[in-house]
Image (tube, rainbow, N blue to C red):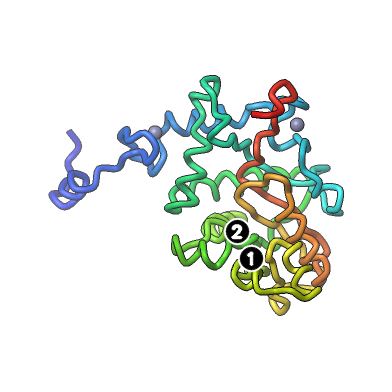
Amino acid sequence: MKHQGIGTRLLSLLFPRVCALCQAPSPDGDLCAECRRKYAAGTFLRCPICRKTADRCLCGVDFPSSSRTTIAGRPFLALNFYIPADRLGEEHADRVTERMILDLKRRGTYAEFFAGECARQLGLLLEEAGEQPRDWIFTYAPRSPEKFAEVGFDQGEEVGRRAAKLLGCPFVRTLARASSSEEQKSLGAAERRENAREGLLPRRRSISDGGRYLLFDDIITTGSTVKAAAEILYEAGAADVFPVALARTYPLSPAHPDR
Ligand SMILES: [Zn+2]
Ligand SMILES: [Zn+2]
């Protein structure tokens, strides 16, 4: 038996490392090998409409039409699909992605894991395009001030900062989000326009002219947040905005349009 100091033994008795998802022993961190395998297998899920994986499916999103930026021919990067709870049927019993993203949003769990996945996939795309990560700036679409106050962190910032560090590119907060009460009060034309932009506002002094941005958002559903954020960044002088998401909401199957 390997010798362990009394302190180490005591620590592992007090705080045994277990998988945050299935509670199995997990010496390597928050996610055990079996759950990692399930996550990876889940990334091969195909869209019920176009039969493509999440990184290539464009069903139900309109933001790529307004985006001028592509990397290696891609208008965005999504690591996986996200299936809403009411559509997670028996056939998806092995999926762990949805629970992981919910845990990330509620408690910040797996920020490390998701940052690693983002950095790895982005690194591959940039390499394919012959680009250097250091020429890009990592930023994110922030959650509302109410939500931030409630949980005490922003998952976009938690994942984005770590992914930027892994890639070796700067991380900059370029956007703010107005509180929903401020949005309610607004009646003027300018404010209505702000509402149409998901309450997002530019932090003008932190947006660099000609900057090339990797724009992180956790889940892309219709793409309206990403579209609004990209428009704001372009108007403020950005040369490129490339959306990066942990997941795309799984499109509705044409056979089950009402599910
Ligand atoms: Zn596990
Ligand atoms: Zn599709």
- Residue 135 shows in the view: no
User: In the image shown, does 198 or 215 lie closer to the viewer?
Assistant: 198
Which residue sits furthest left? 6
Q: Disc 2 and disc 1: Cα gap in Å?
A: 6 Å
Visible residue check, residue 191:
yes
Q: In which quarter of the image is residue 50?
A: top right
Residue 105 locus on image (x, y percent): 49, 51
Residue that badge 2 annotates: 164
The answer to which quarter of the image holds residue 237 is bottom right
* Amino acid type at mark 2: Ala
**Mark 1, secondary structure of its residue:** loop
Q: Which residue lies furthest to the bottom in this view?
A: 205
Q: Position of residue 1 (x, y in %)?
A: 17, 33
For the point 83% across and 64% down, the residue is: 239
Q: How many labels does the image show?
A: 2
Out of 177 and 117, give the one closest to the viewer: 177
Q: Which quadrant of the picture is home to ligand 1?
A: top left
Q: Where is residue 154 in the image (x, y as percent from the top left)?
A: 52, 60
- Identify the residue at horizontal 55%, vertical 68% (top origin): 145
Q: Nearer the viewer, residue 191 or 197?
A: 191
Tell me the quadrant of the picture where the C terminus can be found: top right
Residue ID at (75%, 24%): 254
Q: How crowded is mark 1: few (under 14 residues within 10 Å), some or many (20 or more)?
A: some
- 213 left or right of 39 in image: right
Secondary structure under tag 2 reads helix
For label 2, count other residues whose C-alpha is less than 10 Å away and answer few (under 14), some (14-19) or many (20+).
many
If you read the primary sequence from the N terminus, does the residue marked by circle 2 or circle 1 appear first? 2
Q: Do the residues labelled 2 and 1 touch (CB within 8 Å)?
A: yes
* Marker disc for residue 155: none
Q: Is residue 232 above or below residue 206?
A: above
Please provide percent x and percent y for residue 142. 61, 62
Q: Which mark is residue 170?
A: 1
